[in-house]
Amino acid sequence: MALNQCRWIYKCDDDWLTVTCTAADLDPAMTFALEASGAPIAWLICGEIAAGPAEFDGSPSLTIDARRARLTIRPDRKSVLAKHQPAITFHVVTPSPEIVSRVGGDELLFLDHAARRLPYFAIQTRPTTSFTLVFVGELDDDGSADALCAKYESPREAIARPVRSRISFGGT
């Protein structure tokens, strides 16, 4: 059992898709490891951006660094969140940008690739049997965000270690 980890397993025909989410012990980071048991597949990972107290409240900023396959999300400057925490930043990074074929917003979710200006980010991979992405958050702009992103863009650091626990339920 791991206190900082959860896993989803999906059966697709004869293949298994596994998504493992692990929280870092000390850093504000969540690692998602995706694995396919069969042939390589192209993953389309997307997420809704709710950078405020309610969905579709404001217009958060999405900055794309295609070379590093890094996304940076900041709340709308007029939002309540930005007024109370103006330096808050959220990043999506990967230790394997060479696997990413496209990174962007909602335009990757539609067949015509036309942006609808909806609050979504998306990452499209090339066919692969495994892919890792890490969500990193920073409350203050003290210069540590880039270093933290770089740490989790390193293949060795991106795999957060589960915290093992010895929990006993009952008499022993």
Image (spheres, helix red, strand yellow):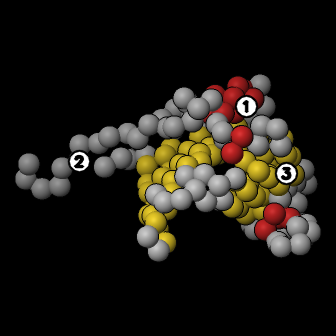
Residue at the (81%, 63%) spot, across then down: 108
State the image quarter where residue 16 is shown: bottom left
- Categorize mark 2 by other alpha carbons within 10 Å: few (<14), some (14-19), many (20+): few
Find residue 106 and report its horizontal and vertical position in percent: 83, 64
Distance in Å between CA atoms under marks 2 and 1: 35 Å
Q: Which residue is mark 2?
A: 167
Amino acid type at circle 1 is: Ala
Image quarter of residue 57: bottom right
Q: Helix or strand or loop: what does disc 1 sit on?
A: helix
Q: Residue at x 78, y 31 (%)?
A: 141
The residue pinned by badge 1 equals 145
Q: Which residue is mark 3?
A: 62
Question: Residue 126: x and y, percent?
Answer: 70, 53
Q: Residues within 10 Å of mark 1 (few under 14, many from 20)?
A: some
Amino acid carrying mark 2 in the image: Ile
2 or 1: tag closer to the N-terminus:
1
- Amino acid under disc 3: Leu
Residue 86 lies, with reference to residue 43, above or below; the image says above
**Whole-percent x, y for residue 90 in the image:** 73, 45
